[in-house]
Amino acid sequence: MTLINMIVAQAATQAAAQGAATTTSTALSVWDLTLKGGWLMIPLALLLLVSIYIFFERLFATSRVTKADSDFLQKIKELIQAGKIDEAKQLCASTNKPYSRMIEKGVSRIGRPMNDVLVAIENVGNMEVARMEKGFNWLATTAAGAPMIGFLGTVTGMVQAFYSLASAGQNSNVSILASGIYEALVTTVAGLVVGILALFAYNFLTSRVNKIMNRLEGSTMEFMDLLNEPAKK
């Protein structure tokens, strides 16, 4: 019985070793799968790199915008009430922020009807928002287009797989079809990953810009109230 147990144990050990070797040999890394995705993986990789660049570039750009000077409007108020319009313009120019450029346009329109001042500030605000949203269209296009490119790669891969199966004739087997299918599905996975990342990046940056817009609107209203104060007095 001892000899039999030793033989069984040795056989089990050899089987486990063979199974582990088979698993190791058949396992594919992410890089191997990427290479098997075909030429459509190239545009997907480019879309991913461009989306990452736009995300971090806009993230840093909007971060600089959000750093506002809490005493800015108070200084503008003091200069305007003192009649120092040119100094108020210089302060806006030296601050060099979206809200300061909006206020500078409003300061330059002092003396005109209030509606004209408000329209001038809003026009500058629209341009500032458009500047902050630079590259957003690319992220939105990537979010919608990357999955479609992935599906295209899958369809073309399936066509090639079935063509290879048909061309094999009598030598055709399931492994030919299976290998072609899993290679074709790689592009779908890659397209979905790129599209999802671009979608999250787009929504995150859009919400960030919306918060900045609310702050700009608040600064505009505060400035308009400032212009109305002398009239109330």
Image: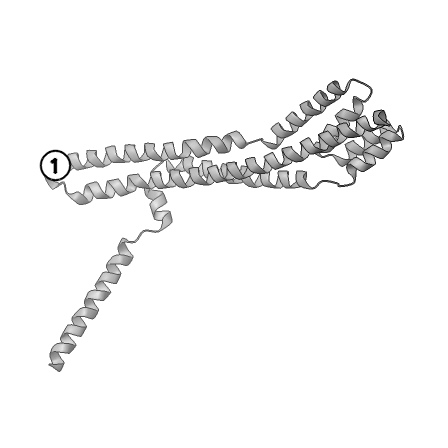
Residue sitting at 14 percent across and 75 percent down?
A: 7
Q: Where 124 falls versus 25 (above or below)?
A: above
Total numbered labels placed on residues in the image: 1
Quarter where residue 209 is shown: top right
Q: Position of residue 85 (x, y in %)?
A: 85, 27
Q: Measured from the top left, where is residue 213 in percent x and y?
A: 64, 33
What kind of residue is marked 1? Gly
Seen from the viewer's position, the closer of residues 10 and 111 is: 111
Of residue 91 and residue 168, the one placed in the foreground of this image is: 91
Q: Which quadrant would the N terminus be assigned to in this image?
A: bottom left
Determine whether, in the image, residue 33 is placed left or right of residue 207. Answer: left
Q: What is the residue that sits farthest to the bottom in this orientation?
A: 2
Question: Where residue 128 sits: x, y (%)?
Answer: 65, 29
Residue 173 in which image quadrant: top left
Answer with left or right where residue 63 lies relative to residue 37: right
Residue 212 location in percent, x, y? 64, 36
Check the image and name the residue furthest to the front. Answer: 232
- Within 10 Å of disc 1 (Cα), the crowding (few <14, some 14-19, many 20+) is few
Q: Secondary structure at mark 1?
A: helix
233 or 184, nearer to the observer: 233
Question: Which residue is at 41% across, 41% downward?
Answer: 193
Q: Is residue 20 above or below residue 231?
A: below
Give the residue drawn at x 41%, y 34%. 146
Residue where numbered disc 1 is placed: 169
Residue reaching furthest to the right: 82
Left or right? Give the position of 146 relative to 176: right
Q: Which residue appears at 87% of the width and 28% of the height?
A: 233
Q: How is the image coloured?
A: one colour
